[in-house]
Amino acid sequence: MSTPPAPSLKSLPAKPTGLRAAAQAAPGPAVGEPTGAARKGVPSAPRPDPHQADGRYPIAWLHISAPRGAVPTATSTCRCGRDRSAVGHTKVLALIDAHTAHRDTCPLRNHQEGRQAA
């Protein structure tokens, strides 16, 4: 009994004859497709521009650092050139009061032209 010859592994299979449609992909979410609310098309609420200028801008800063168990420190800085610092409980409290009082005397906050004209 003779067996038929084994096909060669190096040869290409026979070329199909005729046309046929490509296989369809299974339905499902595409890669990178948004999920949750974005997928459902929920509109986002338009918000006002958070960077819209209202005419106000910072002039003076008070930075207080009081870590637990350590000595508190504070710095008071103003655009008019005032720059103060304090170390210790009593000096920091005094600097806070001085920073608050500086609001009334700061030349950038209180225009001197109006006082001189009156």
Image (cartoon, rainbow, N blue to C red):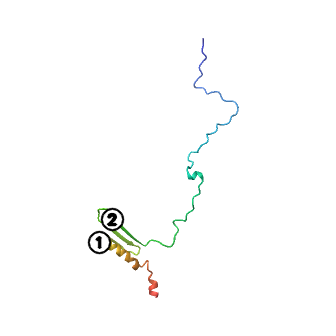
Q: Is residue 57 above or below residue 116?
A: above
Whether tag 1 and tag 2 are in contact, CB under 8 A, the answer is no
Q: What numbered label is drawn on residue 66?
A: 2
Q: Residue at x 37, y 68 (%)?
A: 63
x, y percentage for residue 50?
A: 52, 65
Q: Is residue 34 left or right of residue 14?
A: left
**Residue 49 vertical position relative to residue 36 in the rendered view, above or below:** below
Q: Is residue 103 left or right of residue 53?
A: left
Q: Amino acid at mark 1?
A: Thr
Q: Nearer the viewer, residue 75 or 28?
A: 28
Q: How far across and down, in percent of the image, does residue 110 sit?
A: 44, 80
Residue type at tag 2: Ala
Quadrant location of the N terminus in the rendered image: top right
Q: Residues within 10 Å of mark 2 (few under 14, many from 20)?
A: few
Name the mark on residue 13.
none
109 displayed left or right of 17: left
Q: Earlier in the sequence, mark 1 or mark 2?
A: 2
Q: Looking at the image, which residue is at 70% across and 31% down?
A: 18
Q: Is residue 114 above or below residue 11?
A: below
Quarter-of-image position of residue 112: bottom left
The residue pinned by badge 1 equals 90
Residue 38 at x, y percent in the picture: 57, 53
